[in-house]
Image (cartoon, grey):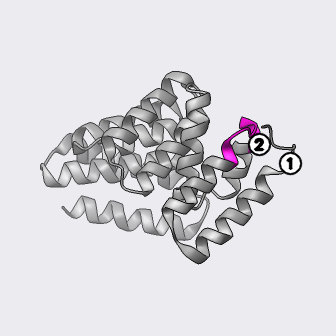
Amino acid sequence: MTKPPGSILPRLTAIVESYKAHHNVGTLLGELQSLADGAPTDELFAAADAHAAIPEVLGPLMEIVVDREPNNARALVRLANAYWLTGRGPEVVGELASRAIAADPTHRGAWHLWALTETNPRARMNRWLQVTQRFADDDLARANLADNATSVGTTEDDPVAITLALETFGELRARAPHAAQRDAIDRAIEALRRR
């Protein structure tokens, strides 16, 4: 049975409010499945987005969306994020991120999750480097690159990684719009140079 248009979000909101009162995951999952049965995918997605801060709601709904649309990069990223927040692990999340990249190579969130899920510090640093090369204006990726390069450089006593970190911090400083940001970056650069 198809749900009437526009009825999904109010029903999901009621389910979420009930879940907040009873905290019964089994009941929640059953109610989410009932909600999804016959619900148009676009409405289901929009309703799930409204409750994206609750991974135990977002995850099951995105599983349904991904089941229906296996190449929906946005749904794959949302599912990967929900899995990450609930501790599903880097292998599962990384596989979803890779699928999202294959479906839409321009999806920045997919690339972020792909880089984040690498467990080897040097390989993770290199992944963040790839993300910054692909998305030149992505300061979050740049900050992650600087942080990971600092970690590799200091733990492995690697001058190339330290140089990469210093250069990346310099780029961040040049782009920082606020004095407080520039001051924090200056302190990070100074600490790294004293090393």
Amino acid found under the numbered disc labelled 2: Glu
- Residue 187, given in percent of the width and then of the height, sits at 37, 68
Q: Are marks 1 and 2 in contact (CB under 8 Å)?
A: yes
Q: Is residue 138 shown in magenta?
A: no
**Of residues 7 and 182, which is closer to you in this image?**
7
- Image point 40% across, 37% down: which residue? 114
Q: How many marks are shown on the rendered structure?
A: 2
Quadrant where the N terminus sits is top right
Label 1 sits on residue: 6
Residue 39 x %, y %: 74, 40
Residue at 56% of width from left, 44% of height from top?
Answer: 78
Magenta residues, start to end: 35-43
Residue 78 vs residue 11: left or right?
A: left
- Label 1 or label 2, whichever comes before in sequence order: 1
Residue found farthest to the left: 157
Q: Callout 2: few (<14), some (14-19), or many (20+) C-alpha neighbours within 10 Å?
A: some
Q: Nearer the viewer, residue 106 or 3?
A: 3
Question: Residue at the spot x=52%, y=72% of the render?
Answer: 23
Image: 26 above or below 21: above
51 relative to 182 in the view: left or right: right
Amino acid beneath label 1: Gly
Which label belongs to residue 43?
A: 2
Depth check, front residue: 167 or 23: 23
Occupied quadrant, residue 18: bottom right
Q: Secondary structure at mark 2?
A: helix
SS at badge 1:
loop
Please give left or right for residue 161 compared with residue 33 in the image: left
Residue at 45%, 35% (x, y): give it. Answer: 97
